[in-house]
Amino acid sequence: MPKLALLDGHSLAYRAFYALPDTLATPAGQVTNAVFGFTSMLIKLIDEERPDAICVAWDVRGGSFRNDQYPEYKAQRESPPDLFREQLPLIEEVLESLGIGQVKAPGFEADDVLATLAGRAMDEGWEALVVTGDRDAFQLPANGIRVMYTLRGVSDTADATPEWIEQRYGVTPGQYLDYAALRGDKSDNLPGVPGVGEKTAARLISAYGSLEGVFEHVDEQTPKLRENLIENRDRAFLNRDLMRLVRDVPVAMDVDLDTFMFGEFARDEARTVFDGLAFLTLWERLVAIEGGAIPTDVLEVDIRTASAKDVAALAGNPIAIAVVADGGEIVGVAAAVSESDAIFISDDLFDVLTIAANAGIVGHDVKEIVRLLLDRGLPAPPVAFDTALAEYLIHPGQRVPTLDVLAERELGVVLKPDDDRASANQGAFDFEGSSGPDLEAAGRRAVAVRSLWRLQRKVIGERKESDLLDNVELPLIPILAQMEHLGIKIDTVFLRRFGDELRQRLGDLEATIHEAAGAPFNVNSTSQLREVLFDRLGLPVIKKTPKGVPSTNAAVLQKLEDAHPIVAALLQYRELEKLRSTYVDALLPLVDADGRVRGTFNQMAAATGRLSQEAPNLQNIPIRSAEGRRIRKAFIAESGHRFVVADYSQIELRILAHLSGDPGLTKAFEEGEDVHTATAARVNAVDPAEVTQDMRRRAKAVNFGLLYGMEAYGLAQRLEISRNDAQDHIDTYFNQFPDVRAFLQNVVAEASACGYTTTILGRRRYLPELASGNFRERQMGERMALNAPIQGSAADIMKKAMVDLEAALRSNELEAEMLLQIHDEVVLEVPDAEVEAVKELTTRVMKNVVALNVPLDIDVATGRSLAECKG
């Protein structure tokens, strides 16, 4: 039995619009939350229901016959927001690109069209599936007609079967119309019978079967209900007339159901539409659907097994490769030799491959491949190109797509046949289960990488990011792979003892807290803590959460610290509990047999270019509190080695001085002054020696606040002063540093004009928010525009410093190795005999990585543990 999916266009689009934030937008600034949500629901429907045909019905402007019959019908509704209305044509464009039929019937509503088509489908032997957020559709469920009702948002739906409707409303689908007529519908401006809510309406209709039956037995009701029913009899019957779905809408009666068949459509046109809307993830979901719903061409590639001679012959040119796996075990790589040919290089030839790859390797997420070679004791080859990294530079801020999706989008080919597509891998690895290595699939991936390399190289060049890619990002890949391969040693004995100590102290603190509260409770439960603090102990409510309940966050507790002894104990408990759960107990299971932990560096995550780390994230090792700093004792150097930690001092403020050219800020750095003291002296018109701690604290808040687009409100919150005083601080600062103000204004203006910001080394960050019609969204875009050139430049400088430092270490034949990159610092593990040489070399390299108008200052520390370096 063929299945026809019938969608209520306006109903689903409206729910999507209010379910998703209006921060969803195209690079040009077009808000797309309604389009995204609607399309997401559509793809989910296609995937889960596999309909043979799809039709979307739309309401038509000008109202329907119901307005003629009852002018007050829906009269209370406000006009839809402009942001919603402007997205409807985009939804229609998506549907047209997918070949999905759409119907509009002047004088009728969308649900009338759906009811008519559902009835026709049932009569013609089809199964009809009505998807809507309108409860009027509860009239429809019958043998052959299903209703999928959207409960909340874009993913929470219910299969509104007759049993579901009866359980929820107490009536059958055949009785629902009469039930609704008694109850009324506020959303349609149809008042019901006074005193008759859902329960009473259900009881009456269930007992008497229909409106007619209710009024035939009106004398059996209580006096008040009888009076209300009699006085509102005409109202109830009018409601029924207006709520009844029309089953014979002429347009829907005349159309051939076969015109709604789904499956054949212009894939290139659809891909263009999805790309224009920046719907990368939705296109990925769409092309991953099994069943051949999307017409595609599989990339045809011939692959043969290579000999050592074949591998050696690859030398002299970059080699495009993809990993081959068998049952999760790496057994080799495929290397592309032409646009349609590849060779399989088995893992016993990897040593030959690393020699042949003298011109570099090309892949998708190459770091995984380099790490594989390093873990097998082979040297890391140079990296000539990475299609994932290139995509990250081309579309910063978006999730890097899989190679399969990238090949679909850019090359118009499929790397996996339809029956394999659901298992498409996310990165460089191509695991195919235990049925033997899929050499053809790996060959297709290698050839696709080769083709994408040429396309992306051209785009990168057009965007003037070739230097950034070739001199910073690509040479950083083997460095990060080596850092992951090496890891860092953990003192497990110390960590276990520290964990035991923390658990003992936490138990003591918990007893203290219970005693202060007057009874035991779960200290880790915010709801129970809220009841203890504000109900039982009567502490004042400082702040409420978005849900309207008293907040118990750290900032609130700090303000309540003098109000009751329990608060100090709670603050200490939370600090120790975070240390225990986030660091001590989380780190120990991650320690490998050699006593080291190995995290993964993310080079393609942050739009600003900053590196991040996971599993574990060692960039968040505590440093602010004395207790937190003790964790750093667990990170130790190998015997006979020390750590050298080199940290850029106030690099973002130095970049601000360079980019703005402000003479006051520049002078402070050139003369080696404490920049916050120098700022405070100028702002307060005092000698630097007269600057108080409070003056410096405020100057520091302004200095760093400006980097993140902080305005008076944020500064007032930070300094706990009035908004007017905060604005005075900002105005005074800009009066003393006028070129900083001019620079920040120009950054926003230029980004608004061209759509992106650039860093010192040329990294772009696209900001569609600046073109948004939403004021709040534009403000967010302006804050990002202020920060992106500065934070992005800091990230680029740090990355280039790592590249230059690695080259310097190797050229000087030193054994020191980089292990970690944390914020603006790099951590090296250095043989004792090399410490002084590495300190001098690291300082010199990092100071000279780029030429700024102000000096780059480096703080260097050494120690047997990270605690000794920064403890």
Image (tube, grey):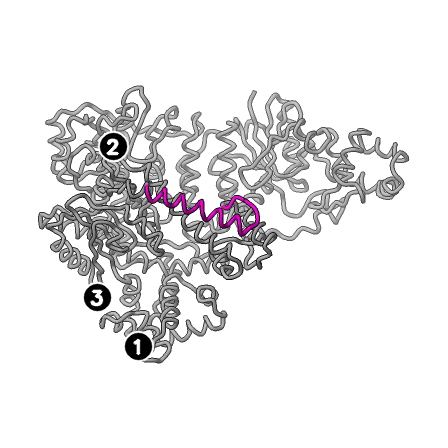
* Mark with earlier residue (2, 3): 2
Q: Say the numbered circle drawn on residue 322.
A: 2
Which of labels 1 and 2 is toward the front?
1
Say if the magenta span includes residue 502.
Answer: yes
Which of labels 3 and 1 is toward the front?
1
- Mark 3: amino acid: Pro
Q: Quadrant of residue 652?
A: bottom left
Q: Which residue is mark 3?
A: 855
Left or right of residue 267, residue 73 in this image: right
Task: Name the element at disc 2.
Answer: strand
**One can see residue 454 in this view:** no
The residue carrying pointer 3 sits among few (fewer than 14), some (14 to 19) or many (20 or more) residues within 10 Å by Cα, namely some
Q: Is residue 654 above or below residue 110?
A: below
Report how far apart the C-alphas of labels 2 and 3 lie in the structure. Answer: 44 Å
Q: Is residue 463 above or below residue 46?
A: below
Q: Which residues are magenta?
A: 497-523
Q: Which residue is mark 1?
A: 688
- Mark 1: amino acid: Pro
The residue carrying pointer 2 sits among few (fewer than 14), some (14 to 19) or many (20 or more) residues within 10 Å by Cα, namely many
Task: Name the element at disc 1.
Answer: helix
